[in-house]
């Protein structure tokens, strides 16, 4: 759903699970840092607000969006995390570089998630203009860093709860 139709930074806090015992990785790109660092602040603050302990949030910075997937993989080798959130911003510009980078990051995170059965959250803004990015980094459409944190919380909980389900025969 488009941000113009629904601001997903507004959510029902009562539906989020306790994350006091959860560990998270955050990988943030420095390219367009005035945007990505605002995403990071929203993401980090949301994790803390919902019970994550500072020592259980592992952050790494990378030069640009293309490096998000490699750093996410390296982070999971270094720290036991329940989910990894990748934050970046690729503004369209005059060439089609954005298509290659955005697609590569999306596929890279999908492949990491499938290979490890661990949530890797796509927090990459893909706007046409800088203003569209600013609108999504704390502007009129909320902060997509908040949304990425909420997604990570929900997916880490899903992973934990799927492991607890009893196997049944049939549907139900």
Image (cartoon, grey):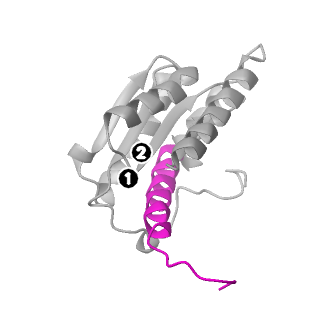
The circle on residue 169 is none
Are circles 1 and 2 on residues that touch, CB within 8 Å?
Answer: yes
Q: What residue occupies the far front of the structure in this picture?
A: 169
Query: What residue do we see at 46% from left, 73% from top?
Result: 15
Question: Cα distance, mark 1 to mark 2?
Answer: 6 Å
Tell me which segment is drawn in magenta: 144-172
Q: Is residue 59 above or below residue 64?
A: below
In this orientation, which residue lies closer to the viewer: 120 or 143?
120
Magenta: main secondary structure: helix
Quadrant where the image shows the C terminus = bottom right
> So how many labels did they put on this image?
2
Q: Is residue 8 above or below residue 170?
A: above
Vertical arrangement, residue 104 with respect to residue 85, above or below: above
Left or right of 74 in this view: 119: right
* Residue located beneath label 1 in the image: 46
User: Does 75 appear in magenta?
Assistant: no
User: Circle 2 — which element?
Assistant: helix
At label 1, counting other C-alpha atoms closer than 10 Å, the crowd grade (few under 14, some 14-19, many 20 or more) is: some
Residue 89 on image: x %, y %:
58, 29
- Residue 139 in view in this figure: no
For the residue labelled by badge 1, is the local secondary structure a helix, a strand or a loop? helix
Q: What residue appears at the point 53 percent right and 55 percent down from the top-left corner? A: 9
The residue where tag 2 is placed is 42
Between 137 and 50, the residue placed more toward the observer is 50
Q: Is residue 5 visible?
A: yes
For the residue pair 136 and 1, the one nearer the viewer reads as: 1
């Amino acid at each position: 759903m488009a941000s113009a139709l629904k601001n997903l930074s507004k959510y029902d806090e009562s539906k989020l699970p306790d994350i006091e015992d959860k560990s998270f990785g955050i990988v943030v790109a420095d390219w367009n840092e005035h945007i990505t660092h605002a995403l990071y602040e929203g993401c980090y603050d949301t994790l803390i607000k919902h019970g994550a302990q500072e020592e259980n949030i592992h952050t790494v910075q990378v030069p640009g969006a293309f490096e998000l997937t490699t750093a996410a993989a390296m982070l999971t080798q270094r720290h036991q995390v329940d989910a990894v959130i990748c934050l970046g911003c690729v503004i369209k510009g005059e060439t089609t570089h954005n298509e290659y980078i955005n697609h590569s990051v999306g596929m890279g995170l999908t492949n990491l998630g499938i290979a490890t059965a661990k949530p890797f959250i796509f927090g990459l803004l893909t706007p046409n203009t800088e203003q569209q990015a600013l609108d999504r980094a704390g502007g009129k459409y909320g902060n997509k860093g908040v949304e990425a944190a909420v997604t990570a919380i929900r997916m880490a909980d899903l992973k934990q709860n799927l492991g607890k389900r009893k196997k049944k025969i049939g549907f139900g």
